[in-house]
Image: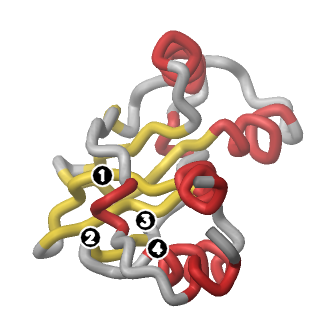
């Protein structure tokens, strides 16, 4: 698949997104989330505030927010989560997802259907698809 094929692709976000969503509440500690990420082999956890998914904590947050600011391991994820969530609709093209990630300078997008978050799509998902 060439770059041109990727741009004009009919492949949709729903075709390559991850449907398993792991979420925690804002009071969960960064240590607890790090253990979840390690055990699950994942790079992001969604964060619920007042019962709604409203933020994300990524592996990159550990370097840029926790370590760089010398925060303790009992810091709540609510203090370091990226919010609001940047989203994309499940029926948009993967090239639209790539454009949104590039313009927002992020590597993960929450996927929505009728305003509900149903999955995640990552830059790794896009690269994997491009390599096919």
Of the two numbered discs 3 and 4 on the same chain, state the one appearing first in sequence.
Answer: 3
Q: Identify the residue under disc 1.
A: 119
Q: Nearer the viewer, mark 3 or mark 1?
A: 1
Q: Is residue 88 left or right of residue 31?
A: left
Q: CA distance from mark 2 to mark 4?
A: 10 Å
Identify the residue at image location x=59%, y=50%: 128
Q: Nearer the viewer, mark 2 or mark 4?
A: 4
For disc 3, the neighbor class at 10 Å (few under 14, some 14 to 19, many from 20) is some
Identify the residue at image location x=68%, y=74%: 2
Identify the residue at image location x=33%, y=33%: 22
Q: Nearer the viewer, residue 45 or 76?
A: 45
Q: Position of residue 103 (x, y in %)?
A: 67, 84
Q: Quadrant of residue 108?
A: bottom right
Label disc, if present, on residue 85 of the rendered structure:
3
For disc 1, the neighbor class at 10 Å (few under 14, some 14 to 19, many from 20) is many
Name the secondary structure under disc 3.
Answer: loop
Name the secondary structure under disc 2.
Answer: loop
Q: CA distance from mark 2 to mark 3?
A: 15 Å
Q: Position of residue 56 (x, y in %)?
A: 48, 50
Q: CA distance from mark 3 to mark 4?
A: 18 Å
Of the two numbered discs 4 and 1 on the same chain, state the one appearing first in sequence.
Answer: 4
Q: Identify the residue under disc 2.
A: 90
Identify the residue at image location x=17%, y=48%: 51
Q: Nearer the viewer, residue 63 or 117?
A: 117
Of the two numbered discs 2 and 1 on the same chain, state the one appearing first in sequence.
Answer: 2
> Is 126 drawn above or below residue 80 in the view shown?
below
Q: Position of residue 43 (x, y in %)?
A: 58, 35
Q: Is residue 78 left or right of residue 103?
A: left
Q: Are marks 4 and 1 in contact (CB under 8 Å)?
A: no
Of the two numbered discs 2 and 3 on the same chain, state the one appearing first in sequence.
Answer: 3
């Amino acid at each position: 698949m060439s770059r041109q094929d990727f741009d004009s692709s009919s492949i949709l976000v729903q075709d390559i997104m991850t449907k398993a969503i792991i979420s925690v509440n804002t009071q969960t500690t960064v240590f607890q989330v790090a253990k979840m990420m390690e055990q699950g082999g994942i790079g992001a956890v969604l964060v619920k505030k007042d019962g709604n998914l409203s933020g994300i904590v990524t592996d990159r947050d550990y370097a840029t927010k926790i370590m760089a600011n010398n925060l303790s391991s009992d810091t709540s994820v609510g203090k370091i989560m990226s919010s609001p969530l940047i989203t994309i609709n499940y029926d948009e093209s993967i090239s639209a997802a790539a454009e949104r990630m590039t313009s927002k300078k992020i590597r993960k997008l929450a996927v929505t259907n009728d305003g509900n978050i149903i999955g995640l799509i990552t830059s790794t998902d896009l690269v994997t698809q491009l390599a096919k």
